[in-house]
Every structure is written in structure tokens, then in C-alpha cells.
Amino acid sequence: MKAGVIVFPGSNCDRDLAVAFERAGAQVQMIWHKETELPTDLDIVGVPGGFSFGDYLRCGAIAAQSPITRSLIKHTERGGYAIGICNGFQVLTETGILPGALMRNANLKFICKPVGLKVETTDCAFLSGYEQGQEITVPVAHHDGNYNVTDEKLAQLRAEGRIAFTYTDNPNGSTGDIAGVISKNRRVLGMMPHPERCVDEMHGGTDGVAMFRSLVDSVVAA
Amino acid sequence: MKVRVDVMLKTGVLDPQGEAVRHALGNLGFDGVEKVRQGKVIELDVAEGTSEEKIKEMCEKLLANTVIENYAIQVL
């Protein structure tokens, strides 16, 4: 499997994400945001965490206008796989690839700690390695992770089984305790917690491994 | 030509920062502040004759996130 990781000025989880992909067996290339086209042979594109463009204007808003992001939108429209983590999730909502918006945490604090997540669906390539309802522990590190959607949209996400994870103890005020959502075609995942920060015993946990592994297995099999 | 764009959270979207400011005003002894909403003011210096349509496009594409924010354009 070939994975690409987009790098914006201010990205800081790009190398962690690359390592997580590599450990799962993917070949990884880093892609600078000024590139105008993604390599055509990529199976998945990762949008990493960090503080792209210093979080100016709104988190992810400027990165959503980067040249490479236009190519990313086309990639997802063609049915390509993508994952956005933390700032990457913010970028995906700013482009409209995923619904909703991420606002300042309800308690206004930067939250950096391991949190409990409940796996809400296993019906997608990212989540097939978990059990439905399984509780896992994954670190969060964000100031703007308060997921906001309208009641209507929330009902739609629930009906379509597009909530990937919920927090077991909501740290940031997110609507419906939502920690991650998937796209309508189930090939794009956005989440605030950092699965790439729990893929090694030395990280203090390995609950993220199943995500990268099942992703590589599903995409290679497809 | 100077243009001012006000960006505010939509009614109904909780504003944790506004709420914190309201609390702080209360702590300072300012009674009766029932609600505070915090937004952004963006001033643009654009070419003379730039159409309101163009400014609107700027707001929709970048300046505001219309999922959670409203904007108001004012030519100064």
C-alpha cells in the first residue's frame, strides 16, 4: 500500500503518522503543501496533526486553501482513502470533505491527555480491526476539538452509522460526544485523538495499531 | 476602498469564549451582563469598485466558516 502524508508549514505530527503507516507495512512519501498534484498511485492520503499556518484565522482554514488540498479534494471525490488527525480533521471539515466544524474546547483549555474512546462502527477500512463498542485509549492534544454539528446533521450521521468514535468522558464539549466521523462513502476518516501516538509500547499504549493494520489489510485486499 | 467584515458565531452555536468573558466581567463587579458573544472584525483594503459579490465570495470561501459563523459586510 502506498500512503502519502501532506506537510503544511506548522504540521508537527507528520513524521509520527508516516512511522505509523510504515510500521503497518505501507510505503510512505511526504508531500509538501505547495505541490499541486498528489502522486497518482497513492492508496491513502494522511493529513497530519499540528498547527498548520499557526492556526491563523481558524484552525485548518488556510491549509484548506493550499494547492495540494485541491488535489486532495479531487482524490476523495474519486473515492480515494484519506485520514485527517487533529489539525488534519480540522482541515477536512474546513474543505467540506467531512461535515461539521471544530470549535474552541468548551472549558477553553488546551487538553493533552489519554482519553477513552468507544468504537461506534466497524464498517469501514479504518475500523474493521476493532470490535463494535470496544473501548480504547488514545491521546488527545488540542485546543479546538469541540465538534459542532446541527441536530439535523447529528441525526443523519447517527442514522448513516458515520460516527467512528465517541468519547467515554467528553473532554471538550463535542456534540454527541463525537471524537471522529467518516464520510458518506466510508473512505475518509477525521478524528481529533491521535492514533499515531499509540502504536508502540514506549508510547504508553498500542490501541492505534489496529487502525493502521486494518487499513493496510483492507486497502491491499481491495 | 476599505471594507469591514464582521464574523460572528451563528445564533444557537455555544460560544465558550464569550461565556468566559461574561464570567470575567461578573467577577470584576459588572452586574447584569446577561450575554457576551465574541467575534472577529476583518478589515480589507481592496481595489476601488470591487463588487460586493466578490467580497461575499471571499467571506464564503475563507473569511467565515459558514457551518458555524455568519458574516456581515460593510463598505467604509
Image: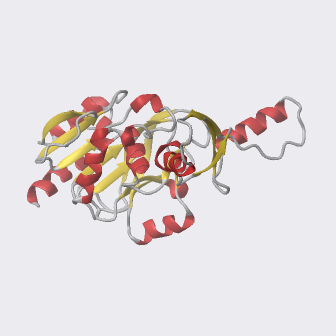
Determine if residue A145 is in view.
yes
The image position of residue B15, as x and y in percent, is: 66, 46
Q: Residue at x 22, y 59 (%)?
A: A78
Picture quadrant where residue B17 is located: top right
Q: Looking at the rendering, in which quadrant would you find the C terminus of chain B?
A: top right
The image position of residue B51, as x and y in percent, is: 54, 48
The image position of residue A1, as x and y in percent, is: 10, 47
Does A8 sit above or below residue A44?
A: above
Q: How many marks?
A: 0
Determine if residue A169 is in view.
no
Q: Residue at x 89, y 43 (%)?
A: B32
Picture quadrant where residue A122 is located: bottom left
Q: Is residue A25 left or right of residue A85?
A: left
**Most distant residue in the front direction:** B49
The image position of residue A40, as x and y in percent, is: 12, 47
Q: Is residue B20 left or right of residue A170?
A: right
Here the colouring is: secondary structure
Q: Residue at x 36, y 36 (%)?
A: A49
Residue A126 vs residue A201, the one in the foreground: A126
Q: Residue at x 21, y 55 (%)?
A: A80
Q: Looking at the rendering, in which quadrant would you find the N terminus of chain B?
A: top right
